[in-house]
C-alpha cells in the first residue's frame, strides 16, 4: 500500500513536470503571439514613411556618365506600400535601396513577405522609371517573395510581366543571401542570384550590347550576379547602407559581341518614421 502511494506520487510528479515543460511554453508563446498580433493590428492603420538620398551608378566602369544622386521616398499604410515603406522589410529581410513601386503586401511577417506590385519600367535602360531620364517606358507587374530561412540565410524570388507588351517580356529572378552581423545593429550581406527571361526581354534589356546582334539569344537563364551589401541602423529612425554588385552575362548572351561584366554600386542614408 505504501509502495503504491509512492508510485502514485512519483507518477503525479512526473506528469506535473511534463505538463509544466510542454504546456506552459505553448501558453506563453500563444500569449506572445496574441500580443504581437495586437501590436500589428494597432499599427495597421498608421501612415509611416521613409525619406533619404542615395548615390548610385549602374556601371562603375563609366562612373562619370552613370553616377546619379536620387531621392529615396517610401510610404506605407496598412498593406499598401510605396518603395521600402516604413523600413520593416529593409530591416528584417535585407531589402535596400529604393524602387518607385506601389505594392500590396499579401503577407508581411517577420520572416516572410509576399507582395504584388505594378510600376513604370524603362525598357531602354533596364531600370525603374526615372523622371530625370528619357527612353521607352512600359508598365510592369511584379510578384515578390522574400523569405528569411533562418537568422543568416534568406531566399528571394520575383516574377515580372510587361503588361503593355512593349519589349520587356517576362522575367524570373531567383536569389540567395547570407547575412553576417558585423557590429551591433549592422549586417554584411553576401548575395547571389540568376535571372531567367524570355528572348524578347534579353533582346531589349540593355544598352551595353550595342555592337552585336541579339537575334540569336533565346529564352532562358542568361545572367548571374553577386554582390556585397553593408547596412547599419544608427538609431531607431536613422540608417545607412552601401552596396556593390557584379553582373555577368552567360550562355548565348555572353557570346554576343559587346557583352561584358558590369559592376554597379550605391550608397545611401535613410530616415524611417515608424
Image (spheres, grey):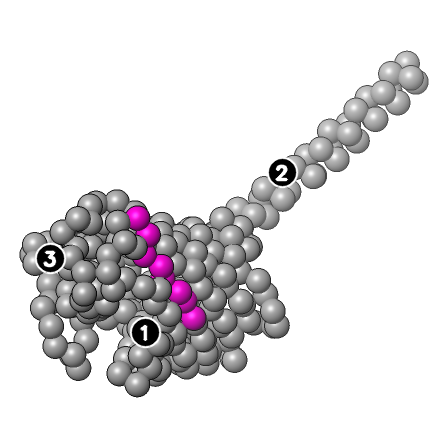
Does the segment drawn in magenta span residue 250? yes
259 or 264: nearer the viewer: 259
The secondary element bearing badge 2 is classed as: helix
Mark-to-mark CA distance, 2 and 1? 57 Å
Q: Say which quarter of the image contains residue 240.
A: bottom left
Q: Which residue lies under the disc numbered 2?
A: 23
The rendered magenta stretch, by its main secondary structure, is classed as: strand
**Residue 249 locus on image (x, y percent):** 32, 56
- Horizontal arrangement in the rendering, residue 225 relative to residue 134 (left or right): right
Relative to 211, does residue 174 appear above or below in the rendering?
Answer: above
| Boundaries of the magenta span | 244-251
94 or 211: nearer the viewer: 211
The secondary element bearing badge 1 is classed as: loop
Q: Residues within 10 Å of mark 3 (few under 14, many from 20)?
A: many
**Residue 32 locus on image (x, y percent):** 53, 53
Q: Which residue lies under the disc numbered 3?
A: 167
The secondary element bearing badge 3 is classed as: loop
In this rendering, the label closer to the viewer, 2 or 1: 1
The residue at the point 26 percent across, 49 percent down is 252
238 or 194: nearer the viewer: 194
Mark-to-mark CA distance, 3 and 2? 58 Å
- Could you tell me if the residues under marks 3 and 2 are in contact, i.e. CB atoms within 8 Å? no
Who comes first in sequence, dot 3 or dot 2? 2
Q: Which residue lies under the disc numbered 1?
A: 59
Q: What residue occupies the far top of the structure in this picture?
A: 1
Mark-to-mark CA distance, 1 and 3? 22 Å
Q: Say which quarter of the image contains residue 129.
A: bottom left
In this rendering, the label closer to the viewer, 1 or 3: 1
The residue at the point 39 percent across, 74 percent down is 265
Residue 21 visible in rendering: yes
What's the mark number on residue 266? none
Q: Quadrant of the N terminus?
A: top right
Amino acid at each position: 500500500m505504501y509502495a503504491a502511494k509512492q508510485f502514485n506520487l512519483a507518477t503525479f510528479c512526473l506528469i506535473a513536470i511534463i505538463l509544466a515543460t510542454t504546456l506552459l511554453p505553448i501558453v506563453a508563446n500563444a500569449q506572445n503571439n496574441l500580443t504581437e498580433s495586437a501590436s500589428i493590428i494597432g499599427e495597421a492603420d498608421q501612415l509611416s514613411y521613409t525619406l533619404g538620398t542615395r548615390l548610385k551608378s549602374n556601371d562603375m566602369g563609366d562612373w562619370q556618365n552613370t553616377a546619379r544622386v536620387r531621392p529615396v521616398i517610401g510610404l506605407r499604410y496598412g498593406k499598401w506600400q510605396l518603395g521600402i515603406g516604413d523600413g520593416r522589410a529593409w530591416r528584417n529581410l535585407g531589402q535596400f535601396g529604393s524602387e518607385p513601386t506601389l505594392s500590396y503586401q499579401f503577407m508581411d511577417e517577420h520572416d516572410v513577405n509576399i507582395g504584388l506590385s505594378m510600376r513604370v519600367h524603362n525598357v531602354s535602360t533596364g531600370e525603374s522609371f526615372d523622371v530625370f531620364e528619357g527612353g521607352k517606358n512600359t508598365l510592369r507587374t511584379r510578384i515578390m517573395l522574400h523569405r528569411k530561412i533562418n537568422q543568416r540565410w534568406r531566399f528571394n524570388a520575383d516574377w515580372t510581366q510587361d503588361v503593355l507588351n512593349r519589349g520587356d517580356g517576362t522575367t524570373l529572378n531567383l536569389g540567395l543571401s547570407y547575412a553576417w552581423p558585423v557590429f551591433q545593429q549592422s549586417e554584411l550581406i553576401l548575395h547571389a542570384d540568376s535571372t531567367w527571361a524570355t528572348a524578347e526581354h534579353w533582346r531589349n534589356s540593355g544598352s551595353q550590347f550595342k555592337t552585336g546582334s541579339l537575334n540569336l539569344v533565346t529564352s532562358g537563364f542568361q545572367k548571374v550576379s553577386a554582390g556585397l551589401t553593408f547596412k547599419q541602423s544608427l538609431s531607431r529612425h536613422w540608417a545607412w547602407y552601401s552596396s556593390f554588385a557584379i553582373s555577368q552575362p552567360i550562355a548565348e548572351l555572353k557570346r554576343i559581341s559587346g557583352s561584358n561584366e558590369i559592376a554597379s554600386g550605391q550608397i545611401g542614408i535613410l530616415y524611417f518614421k515608424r
